[in-house]
Structures are given as C-alpha cells and as structure tokens.
Image (tube, rainbow, N blue to C red):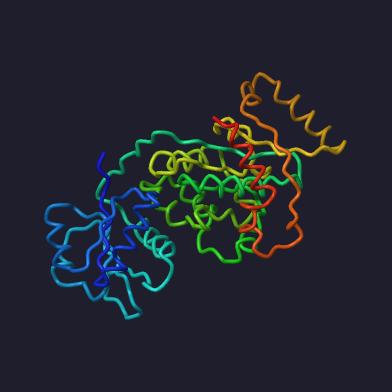
Amino acid sequence: MKRSIFAVCDPESEYAENFADYLNQKNQLPFEVHAFTSPEALVAFAREHPIELLLVNASALTREVKLLETGKLVILSEGEECPDPYDSVYKYQSTSRIVQETMAVYGEGSTRYSLLPVLHKNITVFGVYSPLGRCGKTTFALTLGQELARTRPTLYLSLDGWSGFSALMKRDFSRSFSDLLYYARLREEGMIHRINSAVVTKEHLDYIPPVTLEDDIRQATWEDLEYILNEIVSYSNYESIIIDIGNAFPDPFRLIQWCGTVFLPVLEDPVSVCKLNQFEHFLTDPAYNGIGEKITKVNVPLLSCAHSSDNYVEKLLWSETGEYVREILKHQP
C-alpha cells in the first residue's frame, strides 16, 4: 500500500537530504518522505504526486508553492515572521523536535486521505509488570527498550502514575500521555498524528512522556487505552512496543492479556515472596486463563550506579541490567 507523501523543501541541500534520510531511516511516520532543494522541483513533483504534508523553508514559499493543493503546508522558519494563514516551526532545533512540532500542527487539521494500515511482518508487544514495589520494573523496562531499539524500531510506554520522567530525562515535555487519553475519549480521526506529535527520542529509543497526574491514568478506561494502542499497532512502523505497566491503571489484567510477553520483576525477601504467591494464586482464577503462560519472572540486578541520577538512563544499556536483559532476550522467540 502506498503511503501519503511528506515533502520537505529547503535550499540547503545537505539539510533537506539529511532531514529526509532521518525520517526514512526511523520509518515511524505514516508517510513517504521526499526532499527538495528548489520550489521548481517541488512544484513539478507535486503535479504528478499529491502531497499530504509539506514543510517548506520560508525562502522557498513562492506563489506556485502556495497554490499547491496540499493537505497541510507548514513553514520551516529561520526566525522571520511567517505570513498568515500558515503555521511554522523553527528550523534550528533538533530534527526530532521539528517532527514533533510539525505533527502537532498537522494533527490539528483534518486530512484529505484515509490512513492505510501498515503491513507488519512482525510486531512484538512486551509488558513489564509486578505487584511489588522497588523491584527494578522501570529500570528493566527502559533497558529492554534501549536494547531492542539498537536493532529495530521500538516504542516505550510508561503507564505509571508518578513516573518522574521530566527529572529522569532532564527535560520538560510539551505533550504527554495525558493528552493522548483526552483525544482518545473524543475518538478523533487521525489519532496517530496526535501520537506522533507526542513521541520523543532518547538515543534510538522512542517514548511517549507519561501522564502528568496520576488521576489521568487512574480514570482511564480500557477502551480508551486500547484505542491508542491499536492506532500505534495499525499505523506506525514499530516492531517492538514496551509497556511499563503501573498499578495506577485500574484494569492491568486486560492490558497484560493484550501483551505478547510479560516480564515480572521479583524480589526474594519473605514479604515479597508472600505477595507473589498471592498474585500467582489469583491468576489461577478461570477469568485470567492464559495470563500465567505469558509471564517470565526476572530478578533485576542491583545497579552499581543506582545511587546517582547523573546520566542514569544512558548508563543502563551497558550496566549489569543491560547484560542481564541481553541474556534474557537470547531465550525469547
């Protein structure tokens, strides 16, 4: 199935080509990306190929370009004031941030074309869940995501109520999973564009910043969450999805059933063992038939860097946890 076209036009050939290469290599947007260095070449292409999303440098915004029938035109600004009625994004920032802002603008409007589902050869959904606290659940999930992202497009989702991600990633976020839950309740068309506008990249791993308030995940319904997940599966090119399942979500077992494989971090102290025994007994209820077969217990090693938050996430891949995750993955199908 042919995807809609995302065209970028900038007179700096290296910039335009690198931008298109970045998007085509990540292959996460539901678009076919083309780069142009002149408005003339862009217009000639557009006569034969309808362009759904056009990101064009202000200097290349000629009369002919303005007349093109595009789904959405966004100006790539170098700081100058942009003419109405066009939205703009600032050129001199990271490519991932430009894409995020462009997709946010694009998601505000309606599209002319229906999105086509992506034909996946294979997609694996890993859940990470534990009834225990302080067991290394998020550390394991983040490390798993980073390891998988080395070889395949991977998305990490945290459903924790209080994730501390702004401090952990040392940055603020303009959008979060809270926004996606809001739009999911509206059942808007083109939800995948809202999702793409929230995606942030750390090294090779994509993630969506978690909810900003625990109540947002506590009040979420399974139907809303399933809607978001199905949009990601249907319209993105991710081959792996990591879901860090917190206890704030009111129906974790529906989510566990939705996952293909679930890693369950454990602890060996007497209290934790009693809690795990109770959890495993609960899973014998016929209503949860099959969940136990999905679960792989993991004993996440204590990190030598655990007492320092400096570059904590960056250290995970080559830490004791990273070695442990690689060993675990050797035994996965």
Pick out the residue farthest to the bottom: 80
Residue 189 appears in the picture as rendered:
yes
Residue displayed at 76% across by 41% down: 132
Percent from the top left, x then y, of residue 332?
Answer: 57, 32
Percent from the top left, x then y, of residue 321?
Answer: 68, 47
**Image quarter for residue 265?**
top right
Residue displayed at 63% across by 40% down: 128
Using the image, determine if residue 90 lies above or below residue 124.
below
Pick out the residue farthest to the top: 286
Using the image, determine if residue 160 lies above or below residue 226.
below
Percent from the top left, x then y, of residue 271?
Answer: 86, 37
Residue displayed at 55% across by 56% down: 209
In the visual, does 221 lie left or right of 45? Answer: right
Who is closer to the viewer here, 302 or 136?
302
Who is closer to the viewer here, 267 or 193?
267
Q: How many marks?
A: 0
In the visual, does 278 lie left or right of 298? Answer: right
Quarter of the figure that contains the N terminus: top left
**Image quarter for residue 91?**
bottom left
